[in-house]
Image (cartoon, rainbow, N blue to C red):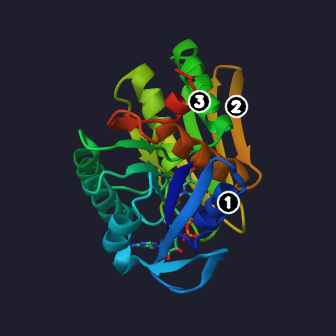
């Protein structure tokens, strides 16, 4: 039985992850933390614990895995706390600065196993593989990335769009990246990244490869958060008791 705790328990993702964990026969949801709603029931027998009590509660109940869907600044602290206590991690939060990323990596390295990914869906992880193949074959084409999300999303562009830039850079080397465009002037070789925000869009990502006389678009659209939440739970099952290190969803899905 893998024992799971969740930070961001009352958020959109945290709520779904808890539901998915409760459905799994090989998992037990043991604690949920948030900055509001302390004492509110999450599932039968588990109430929201105030985020300020994270370290003491984790030390007491010793879950196997902490799943984090919060905000970047909080997530870094949560990761450091869990790593100090030897609790494996699944981190879905996005929007980390390079400094936050490196703090998180050094807290994890040598101490615990962690799956960190801006996107847990099988479709997006396959999408990255297809993008890599297309970038190899269409080296001279112009590349644009367009992402769309709901109007509550805090970080822009999305972590998935930034990871898509990295996939392309791994093939083409260091390419100039511009975020949106405005004003006059001819453009050199660059990748444009465009973030659309509106309504309740769960998450769309399109990569456009445009050449002379043709274009290819590779697109992923999430219809609900279910695929993301079940992917996070799958990652938690996979990461528990793995050798310390930082893993991606490609490791979990054996897509390498
Ligand atoms: N990796 C993925 O597949 C994936 C999918 C969707 C969203 N996300 C990312 O996950 C994060 C959360 O997304 P969401 O849509 O659930 O957001 P949300 O705003 O609905 O939920 C975040 C929750 O975290 C709580 N929180 C903030 N600080 C906290 C702390 N210190 N301790 C405990 N809880 C704290 C908030 O009160 C809130 O309930 C975002 O960064 C988002 O971009 C990742």
Question: On the image, numbered disc 1 is attached to which residue?
Answer: 22
Which mark is nearer the camera, 3 or 1? 1
Q: Is residue 20 left or right of residue 91?
A: right
Label 2 secondary element:
strand
- Which residue appears at 75% of the width and 55% of the height? 224
Asked if residue 211 shows in the view, the reply is: yes
Any atom of ligand 1 within 8 Å of the CB at mark 2? no
Query: In this orientation, which residue lies closer to the viewer: 63 or 232?
Result: 63
Q: Nearer the viewer, mark 2 or mark 3?
A: 3
Distance (Cα) linking label 3 and label 1: 22 Å
Above or below, comparing residue 233 to residue 49 in the picture = above
Q: Neighbour class for label 1 at 10 Å: few (<14), some, many (≥20)?
A: some
Q: Can the viewer see residue 186 in this picture?
A: no
x, y percent for residue 30: 53, 65
Disc 2 target residue: 217
Q: Nearer the viewer, residue 155 or 64?
A: 64
What x and y, as percent, mark residue 237? 55, 42
Which residue is at 64% across, 42% downward? 121
Q: Which residue is mark 3?
A: 253
Q: Residue at x 67, y 74 (%)?
A: 44
10 Å crowding of disc 2: few (<14), some (14-19), many (20+): some
> Based on the displayed image, in which of its 4 quarters is residue 105 positioned?
top left
Toward the viewer: 246 or 39?
39
Q: Is mark 1 within 8 Å of ligand 1?
A: no
Query: Residue 180, position in %: x, y?
Result: 50, 52
């Amino acid at each position: 039985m893998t024992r799971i705790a969740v930070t961001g328990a009352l958020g959109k993702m945290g709520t779904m992850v808890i539901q998915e964990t409760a459905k799994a026969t090989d998992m037990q949801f043991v604690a949920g933390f948030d900055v509001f709603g302390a004492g509110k029931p999450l599932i039968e027998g588990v109430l929201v614990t105030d985020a300020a009590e994270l370290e003491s509660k984790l030390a007491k109940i010793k879950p196997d895995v902490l799943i984090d869907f919060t905000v970047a600044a909080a997530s870094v602290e949560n990761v450091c706390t869990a790593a100090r206590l030897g609790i494996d991690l699944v981190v879905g939060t996005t929007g980390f600065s390079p400094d936050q990323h490196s703090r998180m990596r050094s807290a994890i390295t040598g101490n615990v196993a962690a799956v960190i990914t801006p996107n847990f869906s099988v479709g997006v992880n396959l999408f990255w593989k297809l993008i890599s193949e297309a970038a190899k074959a269409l080296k001279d084409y112009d590349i644009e990335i367009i992402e769309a999300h709901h109007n509550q999303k805090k970080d822009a562009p999305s972590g998935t769009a930034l990871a898509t830039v990295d996939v392309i850079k791994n093939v083409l080397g260091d390419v100039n990246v511009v975020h949106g465009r405005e004003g006059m002037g001819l453009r050199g070789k660059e990748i444009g990244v465009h973030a659309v925000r509106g309504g309740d869009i769960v998450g769309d990502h399109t990569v456009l490869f445009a050449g002379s006389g043709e274009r290819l678009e590779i697109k992923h659209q999430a219809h609900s958060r279910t695929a993301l939440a079940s992917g996070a739970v799958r990652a938690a099952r996979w990461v528990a008791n793995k050798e310390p290190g930082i893993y991606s969803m490609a490791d979990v899905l054996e897509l390498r």
